[in-house]
Image (cartoon, rainbow, N blue to C red):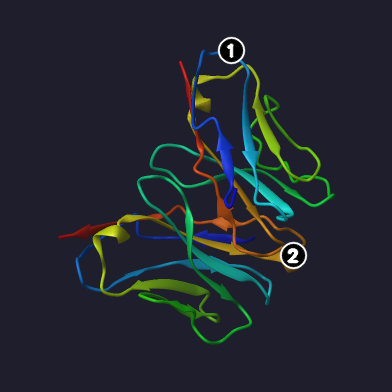
Amino acid sequence: AQTVTQSQPEMSVQEAETVTLSCTYDTSESDYYLFWYKQPPSRQMILVIRQEAYKQQNATENRFSVNFQKAAKSFSLKISDSQLGDAAMYFCAQLNPTSGTYKYIFGTGTRLKVLA
Amino acid sequence: GAGVSQSPSNKVTEKGKDVELRCDPISGHTALYWYRQSLGQGLEFLIYFQGNSAPDKSGLPSDRFSAERTGGSVSTLTIQRTQQEDSAVYLCASSTLAGEQYFGAGTRLSVL
């Protein structure tokens, strides 16, 4: 079964510090996609970063980077130089199109608080 | 418009009434998804449409929920005989095949 687990319901980070959000997943497919989405209090979900499983290089987007460990089925998000605007719910998600479905599987989310 | 548009942004209804929620996806996106999100919770998958294929309705919680997508574009989620437990934010997203999802701002449904 395809699952996504976010074991940290809530995290806090001091402004300008670095924080890592954990995500583990399960799939029997070898080719799939992983995503981190951010949902600020305004509730509009936006994509933070995307990783294709066939790529060994970790994706980066400015202050956001991932640590993709395919064998361990781990996909953590690192936020560097945290800013107040990073405060939000963060959702990890996977997509397994080779399994015959385009249904995204989401984790339960991690609420990130940024302390001034 | 450039993004996914949902209407109304807020809907208050009385228990037992029917409601329709609308989603206008990004032009050219073949996939459209509906999710439900209760306060402070994660996303609950409801249904998705992909091109001309039969929709995946596996997440619809009861037969009071239905959705259609007309002309491969606009989608309507209908909830019949609303119950208080239907109160939530309903999110719509669209994507290209295996692409990232773009989300609308959601419809907050309150059933009194």
* Residue B17 image point, x, y percent: 60, 14
Q: Residue at x 73, y 55 (%)?
A: B28
Query: In this view of the protein, which residue sits in the foreground, A115 or A110?
Result: A115
As drawn, which residue projects farthest toward the bottom? A56
Q: Residue at x 71, y 53 (%)?
A: B31
* Residue A35 image point, x, y percent: 53, 66
> What's the mark number on residue B16?
1
Residue B22 placement, left or right of A7 = right
Instruction: Please state which amino acid type lies under the numbered disc 1.
Output: Gly
Label 1, label 2: how far apart the Cα atoms are: 39 Å
Query: In this view of the protein, which residue sits in the foreground, B32 or A110?
Result: B32
**Does residue B87 lie above or below A100 as drawn?**
above
Q: Disc 1 or disc 2, which is closer to the eye?
A: 1
Mark 2 surroundings: few (<14), some (14-19) or many (≥20) residues within 10 A? some
The verdict on a common chain for dots 1 and 2 is no
Q: How many marks?
A: 2
Q: Residue at x 42, y 54 (%)?
A: A109
Q: Provide the residue designation for mark 2.
A: A99
**Does residue B112 lie above or below A53 as drawn?**
above
Q: Can you say which quadrant of the picture contains the N terminus of chain A?
A: bottom right
Q: Residue at x 63, y 33 (%)?
A: B22
* Residue B56 image point, x, y percent: 74, 46
Question: What is the secondary structure assignment of the residue under circle 1?
Answer: loop
Instruction: Please state which amino acid type lies under the numbered disc 2.
Output: Ser
